[in-house]
């Protein structure tokens, strides 16, 4: 039985990159997204095998959909190893703080913060309900071999891993999308809260913090970010790609950092580094 990953919003952009990478790493992947199953999911099935990709149409902001999502993955595979809280939305309209509406606030916070917070709660409860499942094979044997074979003391493998895809907007201010910034700052705190709460039960929690990644979400601001790059603000002077974020998730999901939790892993070409 392969290890099982849940990737919210795994049908487009960063989430699609993460799904594809995790399938290559040997995971079975369950995707939750709003539209009817898109062509990209059929492609994933063709690449990885029909039985390793599950698609559920629903919203991460809807707790009943979250329940259906967990139940569908458990029913199909009987185990849960990784949750990637990736699904997210930008405000429909970029509005100055003095004009921004409570409707936009509720929508953005509902998807970007309330959704992942309660999905994390439901995932952790479900994992603990299934903790008798054997851990995925491989890492202990591989570690023991590289450390000198029998007698070496392998690290504990986490029972499960949660990765929150936040944003540079967790700390960088954009006054024309305050709701988005608040949602990502909240997700950063959710990472720390859940990291501390779940450490005693063996579940590790990480935050992956992307910078400027080429997806549908940033398409509308393409010219602005092209100029930002041309002005020399990015130490690694190119747009990020979904595969860059997926590579970070893959590292953290591999279980090779069992004594770390609550960490922030930046995937932003160095953008977060203060430069004088
Ligand atoms: P994207 O291209 O707009 O894709 C968003 C994905 O999330 C789609 O699969 C979409 O599914 C899904 N989704 C949206 N609302 C949902 C909901 N209520 N329930 C379930 N699924 C939902 O966005 P992206 O650029 O890949 O962003 C992915 C994550 O990275 C987001 O959390 C975003 O805030 C974060 N991020 C992005 C960037 C960037 O530069 N792109 C930078 C920092 C952080 P449908 O197709 O069905 O709508």
Image: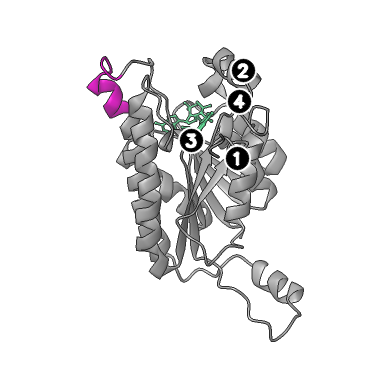
How many C-alpha atoms fall within 10 Å of the one at disc 2: few (<14), some, or many (≥20)? few
Please give the residue where the numbered disc 3 appears in the rendered image.
Answer: 168
Q: Is disc 4's CB within 8 Å of ligand 1? A: yes
Please give the residue where the numbered disc 2 appears in the rendered image.
Answer: 226
- Between 38 and 158, the one lying in front of the other is 158
Q: Residue 249: percent from the left, percent from the top?
A: 58, 47
Number of numbered labels in the structure image: 4
Nearest to the eye among marks 3 and 4: give it.
Answer: 3
Q: Secondary structure at mark 1?
A: helix
For residue 15, which quarter of the picture?
top right
Q: Secondary structure at mark 3?
A: helix
Please give the residue where the numbered disc 1 appears in the rendered image.
Answer: 245
Q: Residue at x 52, y 16 (%)?
A: 221
The range drawn in magenta is 97-107
- Does 98 appear in magenta? yes
Q: Is residue 113 left or right of residue 272?
A: left
Please give the residue where the numbered disc 4 appears in the rendered image.
Answer: 214
Label located before the other in sequence (3 or 1):
3
Nearest to the eye among marks 2 and 4: give it.
Answer: 2
Q: Is disc 3's CB within 8 Å of ligand 1? A: yes
Give the quadrant of the N terminus: bottom right
Q: Residue furthest bottom?
A: 151
């Amino acid at each position: 039985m392969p290890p099982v990953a849940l990737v919210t919003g795994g049908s487009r952009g960063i989430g699609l990159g993460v799904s594809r990478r995790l399938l290559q790493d040997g995971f079975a992947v369950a995707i939750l997204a709003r539209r009817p199953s898109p062509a990209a999911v059929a492609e994933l099935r063709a690449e990885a095998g029909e039985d390793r990709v599950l698609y559920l149409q629903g919203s991460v902001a809807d707790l009943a959909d979250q329940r259906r999502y967990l139940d569908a993955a458990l029913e199909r595979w009987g185990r849960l190893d990784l949750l990637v809280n990736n699904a997210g939305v930008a405000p429909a309209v970029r509005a100055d703080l003095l004009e921004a509406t409570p409707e936009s606030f509720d929508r953005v916070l509902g998807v970007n913060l309330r959704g992942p917070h309660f999905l994390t709660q439901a995932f952790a409860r479900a994992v603990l309900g299934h903790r008798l499942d054997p851990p995925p094979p491989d890492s202990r044997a591989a570690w023991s071999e590289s450390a000198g074979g029998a007698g070496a003391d392998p690290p504990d493998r986490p029972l499960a891993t949660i990765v929150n895809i936040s944003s540079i907007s967790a700390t960088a201010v954009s006054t024309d999308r305050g709701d988005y910034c608040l949602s990502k700052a909240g997700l950063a705190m959710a990472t720390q809260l859940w990291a501390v709460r779940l450490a005693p039960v063996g579940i590790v929690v990480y935050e992956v913090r992307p910078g400027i990644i080429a997806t549908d979400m940033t398409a509308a601001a393409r010219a602005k970010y092209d100029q930002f790059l041309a002005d020399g603000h990015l130490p690694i002077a190119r747009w990020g790609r979904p595969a860059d974020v997926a590579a970070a998730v893959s590292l953290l999901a591999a279980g090779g950092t069992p004594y770390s939790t609550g960490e922030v892993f930046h995937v932003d070409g160095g953008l977060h580094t203060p430069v004088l």
